Amino acid sequence: MKTYKKVALAAILGLGLMVSPASADAGKGKKIYIKKLKETCGVTGAVFAAKHTQDEWTEAKEEGKLTEIMTEACPAGKDFFDSSKFKKKFAPHLYDFVNDFASDSGNIPSC
Amino acid sequence: MKKTLLSLAAISILSINVHADEISDLKLQMKKMMEQIERLEKKQNATNESLIKLDKEQAVTTKSVKKLDKKQKRTSKSLAKVKVHDAFDNIKFGLDFRNTIESLEYKNNDTGEKAHNSSLLTSRLYLTMASSPMKGLIFKGKLAVYSTWGSELYVDDKKQKDWSGSSKASDTVMRVKEAYFVYSDKVGVQPYSVSVGRRPSTNGFLANYRENEPTAGSPASHITNMEVNALMLRLNWDRYVTGSYTKFVYGRAHSGETEGVYSTAGPYASVNDEFENEDVDFALVLGDAYNDGQYQLMYQWAHIFDTKGISTNDTYNVSPTDPLYGKYIKKGSAGTADLASLSFKIDGIGDEITDFLDETTFFISGAYTNYSADSGHSLIGSSDGGNKDGHSIWTGVIIPDGFTDAGKIGFEYNHGSQYWTPMTWAEDTAIGSKIAVRGDAYETYWNFDLFGVKYLPSQIRYTYVQHDYTPNINCAGWITPEETDITAQNIRFAVSYRY
């Protein structure tokens, strides 16, 4: 057991070095949707994401029009999509989430 | 005078000649200019004609571009439709391939006996499937191979049942861990879902953190964590209370003795044998009482029919030479079990106080079990026809590791009383279910993405269990939990490929 405690400790230290900088995360996006938007929009995250195809979400992201396209998909969430927090913090994660469950993604959410 | 007149006449003639030259020059110039103007006019006309031609051509081009634009829009729409259709016109497969090295140790502190394995090596492959041929209808499945390295091709461990075959490392056989479909619709304003099949009933609510799985299975894992086949009806109450729903589940965890496939008495006929080996069915009611994505309160109640225990009246009807001769039937249908839990989770402390608190999860869960024996029977040490109840608490906190993007560190604590007996036989802990501990269990784990790659989720987990009473590692209602002092510990290092 002592040997493996050492192995585990070495692994923790070693693997700690093998990490990458922050990146967008669909899981975080899903959490953000549930917490901040589900009630406001009145639909599940899967329904919200399926309002556009992956190309449409991506095009909006590239043209800096995520606020517009998401407001169009959920008008009640306008304040949230207009907020600086959305633009600075939430948008990349939310984009990853909607892209994962876009209408042509083929991903099937659980019931 | 004559001379003067002559001179004047000469001058006049000369000057007339000079004017005549100038006029002719001017005439010539004018002619040239006229010619030039004519040429320019011709050129201008030609240019105008060209411009008119260009205008016409441009109009034709604009028309063509508009036509092409329309065509492209139509093509894009069609393509999107094809993509949407194509995306759902097949079974979508996913992979979860995990390799682990584990070290485990058991110590009986009463006798000093020890047992250990310093390198248990396992591989687990999940092949996940999903399809949705139409709106409101989905199928999900999971095929599993969970083997120890260098294992037998087929391990015939009688304790290994259908309810844990894909969740405990054994042989290299691929088994069906999950396969079910869900149909969802509305009756009036009431949304409902119905489902049948082998349920996603392992690693449920709260157990997914210690298993480093992004989503939890269906039931709360404090009282049930088993692979089972069942029917399910789900009713959503979201329009009354945020995120609330109830599921009604009925299934079978054990098939009793039946006639064989080619039996002359009747294939698959139920056998009323002397061992009281009856079917074990169960009914569950579970759901979220409230879930706004941050605060979640989940309840669950399970009732198990004909759970196995000791028949205190009947002895085995076997030959006197059989070792079971004269002994009470120990795996007979002995009574019922009721299990209940109430679990509360906070996903993100406060509201955007700090990123650390936003990413912190805290949970606490309480649970109760009651085993009630029928007359002439005993369950987990109860008197004839008596009952035994137990309780448990489980709490945990999961925090960001602070140095990786998605890494989390979790700490968990469990306590169970002497007769605490949940149905968590498929819990993936090499030393046995820590949630079922009759004593205390402490656990810490670090979930992280290897090399920062989200497709390589990995984990280091340490579990320490203090059994104050007989360890509860298998469904065994005929065993009486007695006082003991056994410790078990387990370190697991797991690396997965998940896509």
Image (cartoon, coloured by chain):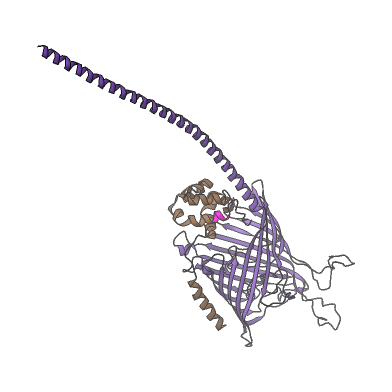
Q: Nearer the viewer, residue A76 or B75?
A: B75
Residue B277: name its quadrant.
Answer: bottom right
- Quadrant in which residue B322 is drawn: bottom right
The percent coordinates of residue B70 (x first, y second) are: 56, 40
- How far from the left and from the top, in percent, is residue B3? 11, 14
The majority secondary structure of the magenta stretch comes to loop
Indicate the position of residue B88 as horizontal and vertical percent values: 65, 53
Residue B408 placement, left or right of B39: right
Q: Is residue A110 magenta?
A: yes
The percent position of residue B452, horizontal first and vertical second, equals 51, 67
Quarter that holds the N terminus of chain B: top left
- In this view, the residue farthest toward the top is B2
What residue is shown at x 53% (from left), y 62% (from top)? B346
Q: Nearer the viewer, residue B448 or B311?
A: B448
**Residue drawn at the location 53% of the way across and 47% of the way down:** A74
Which chain shows up in brown? A
In the rendered image of the structure, the colour used to display chain B is: purple
Q: Is residue B449 magenta?
A: no
Please indicate whether residue B349 sits to the left or right of residue B219 in the image: left
User: In the image as oriented, which residue stretches furthest toward the left?
Assistant: B1
Closer to the camera in the image, B31 or A2: B31
**Magenta-drawn segment:** A97-111
Quadrant of residue B314 within the rendered picture: bottom right
Of residues B270 and B78, which is closer to you in this image? B78
- Location of the C terminus of chain B by quadrant is bottom right
In the image, residue B107 sits, relative to residue B297, either above or below, namely below
Vertical arrangement, residue B249 with respect to residue B64, above or below: below
B199 above or below B314? above
- Asked whether residue B173 appears in the rendered view, the answer is yes
